[in-house]
Amino acid sequence: MDLPARREVELAVDIEVELEYVPRWLQRADGSWSVVGPDGWPVSPEDFAELHADAMAAIAAVSMPVIDVEPISVRDTEI
């Protein structure tokens, strides 16, 4: 190819990504979303998490803990 080396690397990465399964989403008529599996059929989030347990474990290892607190008071200053 007569492309710069950087472009050849980008093409190689694009081809490699296409070979892996990338999650896809389907929006239904009622506005809800569902995960679509590699076969094109909707997959429940639980099944999707089981299929990609290794990726989910890696994400959980580097993610920050979620702190859920209730606000003490809220003041609306736009009135």
Image (cartoon, rainbow, N blue to C red):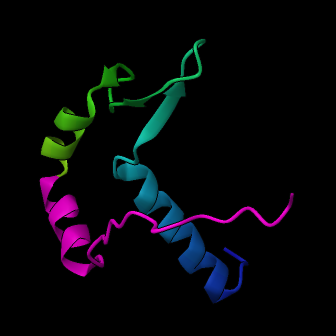
Where residue 1 appears, x then y in whole percent?
66, 73
Residue lying farthest to the top in this orientation? 29
Quadrant housing residue 48 = top left
Quadrant in which the C terminus appears: bottom right
- Who is closer to the viewer here, 23 or 74? 74
- Who is closer to the viewer here, 29 or 1? 29
Quadrant housing residue 53 = bottom left
Identify the residue at horizontal 19%, vertical 50% (top origin): 52
Residue lying farthest to the right in this orientation? 79
The correct choice, above or below, for 5 with respect to 49 in the image is: below
| Magenta span of residues | 53-79
On the picture, is 79 further left or further right than 55? right
Identify the residue at horizontal 21%, vertical 60% (top origin): 56
Where residue 51 appears, x then y in whole percent?
16, 43
Quadrant housing residue 43 = top left
Counting labels gives: 0
On the picture, is 23 further left or further right than 62? right
- Who is closer to the viewer here, 49 or 39? 49
Where residue 21 appears, x then y in whole percent?
34, 46
Task: Please tell me whether the stretch drawn in magenta is mainly helix, strand or loop.
Answer: loop
**Residue 67 located within the stretch drawn in magenta:** yes
Identify the residue at horizontal 70%, vertical 86% (top origin): 4
